[in-house]
Amino acid sequence: MKSKAGQLIIGLFLLAVLVIASWMVASWMFRSLLGLDRSLSSAIIAALVAVFSVIFAYWKEREKARQEAHREKKVEVYSIFFDVVFRLLRETKRPGGADSYVESEELQESFFQLMRGVLAYGSPSVILAIGRWKVNSANNSSQHILLIGDILLAMRKDLGLSNRGLSNVNIHQVYVNDDVEVFLKGTN
């Protein structure tokens, strides 16, 4: 306990020193610029703004390129989840139900591929949503619907899609004929 408190105190002290040093350097630069000729100080300010703009644009472009490089793999991995969900829906409409598919080696292999892919390419929100779904797998069907909705929303967000107006309930309305919200109210 003492080491954590000591680390916190040292961290706060270093942060305070950094803030004070930054303030001193910034105020020295500001005073130095005020002492220069106006045209020279304007040119220096314009150059600093240009340099920071180029650095910021480069940083944003690199971030966008990194996200685009992984997007194709994410789509491939998330498609496994979509395939499993829609296969389960299709199997529940058959006379035997989905029990044979739930117990199949094919489903187990699909989940193994999904988990491996999500760990490598999934965002933290997708990993956390799948973890919550796995931990609460023994809960009732209405809880499953909400947790799967959380996964679908996290995957959409990770792919760069907007979730505006969507909730973990109404996202299921795409593939369910009945009103999902009415169904959930009836199961609680």
Image (cartoon, helix red, strand yellow):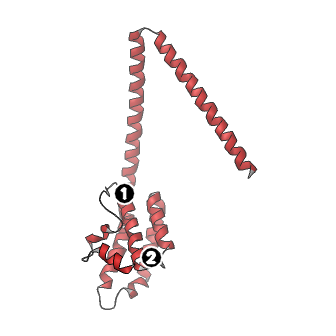
Q: Residue furthest right?
A: 2
Q: Is residue 82 above or below residue 9?
A: below
Q: Is residue 60 above or below residue 89?
A: above
Quadrant of the rendering where the C terminus is positioned: bottom left
**Residue drawn at (34%, 70%), measured in percent from left and top?**
82
Left or right of residue 22: residue 49: left
Q: Quadrant of residue 28?
A: top right
Identify which amino acid the numbered label 2 is placed on: Glu
Counting residues from the N terminus, which is met first, the one under dot 2 or under dot 1? 2
Q: Nearer the viewer, residue 167 or 87?
A: 167
Q: Which mark is residue 101?
A: none
Of helix, strand and loop, which one carries label 2? Answer: helix
Q: For this rendering, which residue is in front, 62 or 17? A: 17
Q: Which residue is rendered at x = 34% and y = 73% of the image?
A: 83
Residue matched to label 1 = 157
Quadrant assignment, res 80: bottom left
Residue 87 visible from this viewpoint: no
Q: Residue at x 40, y 42 (%)?
A: 62
Counting other residues with Cα less than 10 Å from the Cα at mark 2, is it few (<14), some (14-19), or many (20 or more)?
few
Residue bearing the label numbered 2: 109
The vertical placement of 28 against 78, above or below, is above
Query: For the residue marked with disc 1, what is the amino acid?
Result: Lys
* Crowding at mark 1 (Cα within 10 Å: few <14, some 14-19, many 20+): some
